[in-house]
Amino acid sequence: MSSKLFAVIAGAGTGTGRAAALRFSKAYPVVLMARKPGSYQDTVSEINQAGGKAVGISADVTDTQSMGHAFDAIKKELPDFKLAAAVYNVASGYMIKPFLELKPEDLDSSLSGSARGLFNFAQKTIPLLLDAVPESEHSPTLLITGATASLRGSAKFGALAAGMFARRGLAQSLAREFHPQGVHIAHSIIDGLIDVPRTKAYATNDGVEDGKLKPEAIAESYWYLHTQPRSAFTQELDLRPYVERF
Amino acid sequence: MSSKLFAVIAGAGTGTGRAAALRFSKAYPVVLMARKPGSYQDTVSEINQAGGKAVGISADVTDTQSMGHAFDAIKKELPDFKLAAAVYNVASGYMIKPFLELKPEDLDSSLSGSARGLFNFAQKTIPLLLDAVPESEHSPTLLITGATASLRGSAKFGALAAGMFARRGLAQSLAREFHPQGVHIAHSIIDGLIDVPRTKAYATNDGVEDGKLKPEAIAESYWYLHTQPRSAFTQELDLRPYVERF
Amino acid sequence: MSSKLFAVIAGAGTGTGRAAALRFSKAYPVVLMARKPGSYQDTVSEINQAGGKAVGISADVTDTQSMGHAFDAIKKELPDFKLAAAVYNVASGYMIKPFLELKPEDLDSSLSGSARGLFNFAQKTIPLLLDAVPESEHSPTLLITGATASLRGSAKFGALAAGMFARRGLAQSLAREFHPQGVHIAHSIIDGLIDVPRTKAYATNDGVEDGKLKPEAIAESYWYLHTQPRSAFTQELDLRPYVERF
Amino acid sequence: MSSKLFAVIAGAGTGTGRAAALRFSKAYPVVLMARKPGSYQDTVSEINQAGGKAVGISADVTDTQSMGHAFDAIKKELPDFKLAAAVYNVASGYMIKPFLELKPEDLDSSLSGSARGLFNFAQKTIPLLLDAVPESEHSPTLLITGATASLRGSAKFGALAAGMFARRGLAQSLAREFHPQGVHIAHSIIDGLIDVPRTKAYATNDGVEDGKLKPEAIAESYWYLHTQPRSAFTQELDLRPYVERF
């Protein structure tokens, strides 16, 4: 059945992941993936209560076995559905530390969440996205969240930059391989603080009210990217608050 | 009156300019600007007949006097309107020539259309966009068309690259100055052939039907950029057909 | 005679141009080009008194006729010499101004010095550099001075960035066309203040003594670029003081 | 004793590593590091027989314990020496494979050699380089080998690009942290095939003799970077054969 499409969001906790789940749930059943149920339960309930359809699945994107189980579970939950959109929004730990104080584990943790997790998620989702090409109204899309550190290795951001640069390199490579096959791969540079409870205490530039990125605005841009016809795919865009220095 | 907003498109001939005029005319009266009436007349008629409002103005963006007259005329035509969106889509001549065969006039022509024209257009529109900040539902926006040659100086594309690099440098500078004042400046890298009558004869990659950029898709991305809330402005994105090598 | 080689420096006044003239004069007779004799006379004398050979020529790189005369004069002065190295170091006016206060002449002045001048200089020197390929020990080289504004359009630097972006786009295009013909085109991003009398009053980062770029260090890097074998050409490098933020 | 300085090269097998060892051995005793003695023995002998001083040490840069032993051994071999230059030239496996055929181990192997190895090597060498700042004639330098895949994620190069992007992000971060402390961190984009036995069979562009990068030319550029005064550090440069398309 051509209209049975779903979306999956990895890193569906607060912020961008939650907002993307809400946005995509207006059009598709959505699967929210996070390590702990506590990260997605409220959003799953919210979507289901609002008349949408949401499923939560606990999984660790950095672990191939866990990903295997997760996608088996998805297949059981949504047996006839094809994958219209996959969002990779796993955070890799925001770490600012003098280089000589970093531990090898800090680097590994960043590389795992930023690159290995995307690798595993893409290996699971791209075959499903390819399979949906003939039937999806919009080109099946893999949306990947980047950051300032994807483009710039700032002092004391070495571990984070290594991971986010790696994520971007992999995203580019996926775009060049799969665009011609009809799967859209887009990478968004989120250049600024996101307006979530965790960043409440951080001051915005110029002290303005709307000086942080609203998760809903990021999610809306993900939806827009998903709807781009394949005659005009965006591979990369930046998103930043109007008062952000760059 | 807060709801009286309009849009202006420079380089409103065929392709992206025409499509942008049609797209923005769904929301605003639009002013189409081109050197010759023949470039915009049909689109103006089409919009007016469809129940929209369009005005055509002949002007040369590279000539400050001509621009002065044009914006005086706009003020007369739309006396109480504020400027919600301005699109700079002037082509600067697609010239492929061994460097030693180029004439100084080739360079000047590229610099004029690509940079001087944007400079003049921005000097006329930015004060109007700033003036609309308090009243426009969407942040007032200056949308600027870029190209592959904005990022890459290919062999034999020296004149074109000089102009398009200059345009991009100016666009960045405008974004950094005016974003904090609430005016959104976005630059789109159009990386591929646009599907217009002039490119009919050019083969697409992989010989596919939709291997060229549809002007309507570009226009839709311009509209999306215009609607971004200021908590998440995009300064630059790329747009290319799915089969395009990059 | 294969050993009769010379170098020409445009923008040979103080700073980088003067230092490049001194550095290249250790290996070649050098022609110093500037609009006014006052800019090069002292350096010409200094080189000649030290046993080198230097010739000063007044010319305006933005004027093709003036460039024609200049290269005729060079041919008379150094009739049997081939061109080993050409340095384009013309400054385009360091202008920081709110965009709406800029005049069209400010933009034109930047585009002229940054792009049109390089265009004219390259049209005169590249044929001479190509002619020297078989005989020059080092690959004949066109060295082009860039700046922070070549890569970044900062707020209020719009005119400068337009010019310097254009210069870089043209430099890239020249490299892609002429590297395969054996002429080396290198662009150096000078990212910081140069230590010349004019910048004496400007504070350095961290207040250190050597926080500005020494012209001699830039000139040494130009000489190194010139000596690169064609199996390993550098097209672009950055140069900045160790304390510079970037 | 201020003149007792040495250099260490990780990845000192054939090609760039061997050439760097030979080049730096003209000025300093050199330590050649590789996983297997077979990779460095000949070069060690060659340097020692030519009157230089070279020491070979077997170590795995991706293993912190192995690196600990290696630097203990270096301390014993060269007890009073300070570190003038460290070269990170470890290859991370040149792998071209459709993404869906890659194994997680392929990604890990690339991330390990490209990023984790540099991380470990930098944690061991930067304290030594900082210690040499007051006494080294040239600023103590960490030289890092990059590749085309450091800047571009090509189709089917996903694993390699992830690793090389990560390496570049880390290199930038190190530069921004340690330049102000007097340690120079430079990253070289090697954009083309290197002329080593392994690439003998690969055709060069245009079929020319010198269409591959000579390891000696790369090594010479590393030496030049090492000698840059701190008033003009290069953080990144590209190196490519004159016939290379880019």
Image (cartoon, coloured by chain):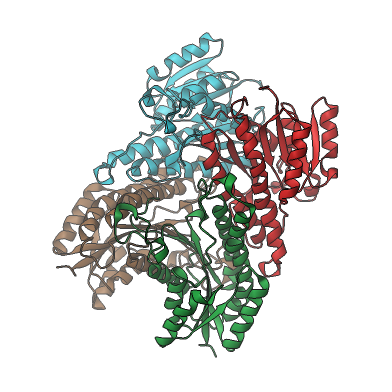
Chain colours: A red, B cyan, C brown, D green
Q: Quadrant of residue B58?
A: top left
Q: Is residue C21 visible?
A: yes
The residue at the point 70 percent across, 47 percent down is A206
Q: Is residue B182 visible?
A: no
In x, y percent, where is residue B74?
50, 21
Check the image and name the residue furthest to the bottom.
D1
Quadrant of the frame with the C terminus of chain C:
bottom right
The residue at the point 38 percent across, 32 percent down is B63
The residue at the point 75 percent across, 50 percent down is A203
In x, y percent, where is residue C195?
45, 68
Left/right placement of residue A227 relative to residue C122 reads right
Quadrant of the frame with the N terminus of chain C:
bottom left
Q: Quadrant of residue C162?
A: top left
Q: In this orientation, which residue lies closer to the viewer: C187 or B71? A: C187
Left/right placement of residue C111 relative to residue B16 reads left
Q: In this orientation, which residue lies closer to the viewer: C7 or C41? A: C7
